[in-house]
Amino acid sequence: MPKLVERKIFSRTRGSGQGPITRLMSPSDLGQYLKPFVFLDLVDAPSSITSSDNLHPHSGIATVTVLTEGNLRFDMGDWGTGLLDYGGVEWMRAGSGIWHGGEYRPAGASRFKGFQLWVALPAALEASAPEWQFIEASGIPTVGPARLIVGAYQGKTSPVRAFDGFNYLLVTLAPGEAWVYETPVGHEVGWLSLSHGSLVGEGPYKAGDMIAFDRSDAAIPLQAGSEGATFVLGSAVPHPHELVLGYYSVHTSDEALKAGEARIAEVRHLYV
């Protein structure tokens, strides 16, 4: 196996928060370094938390939701219905502006655990029409121990209609199992966050940790600890724009942010 630390660690965090949600990254901190990945929450909560609607807007971003434990029922009518559990995905491209919240309900498991990720859209897509995709686990390709949630890797392509230049994988390793992420050329942004177990390395890396790697497209060799490991891993071509931030929005310019916030106000009545 290659040397475990081929890629240097830029940052390691356990985030902040109280209760069921831990904020691991936001656009005003680590998201500035890891863009297009700009926001990451780790949620560990009773499924009943989804029974309360939480309507809110977004523009300029896409959100990606995956579960590492438990299940939830999703229902967005014409956009899709079904079961979200390990290996499935909700992809929501906010684009020009959208309101959402309340698309999930309990589905049998008393608790769930998972990640919600925000990705800054390229300038050409930040004013695009919004869209949703719900893809159950059976529709997501596997590459060894990894589910290819978004992107293209090792000859496989995710059905998620994302933009080119970023990958997002959900990985579970057995106790002691080794695996190498062969970073695609140009994907100089890289990070991972553990939901369960541990990875051998500096520390070692434990459940709840988020690791940001240095800017490089070198391989990322990983090995699970004695209890195994479940984690998400992202890599991407660096986002070329400064982040212009609204309360629920991320854009590439002041003009694009103003347009996104105006559109959010304009379409609010369609969702409330």
Image (cartoon, rainbow, N blue to C red):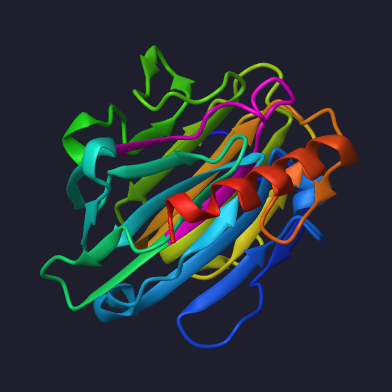
Residue sitting farthest toward the top = 155
Instruction: Determine if residue 253 is in view.
Output: no
Query: Residue 30 sits in which quadrant?
Result: bottom right
Side of 228 where 21 appears, left or right:
right
State the image coordinates of residue 246 (x, y, percent, origin top left): 77, 55
Of 209 and 66, the residue lying toward us: 66
Vertical order, 71 against 61 (above or below)? below
Residue 128 counted in the magenta span: yes
Side of 82 where 252 appears, left or right:
right
Of 116 and 33, the residue lying toward us: 116
State the image coordinates of residue 260 (x, y, percent, origin top left): 71, 42
Where the C terminus falls, by quadrant? bottom left
Vertical order, 165 against 59 (above or below)? above
State the image coordinates of residue 240 (x, y, percent, origin top left): 83, 28
Vertical order, 226 against 253 (above or below)? below
In the image, what residue occupies the spot 64% across and 72% down? Answer: 14
Which residues lie in the magenta part? 115-134
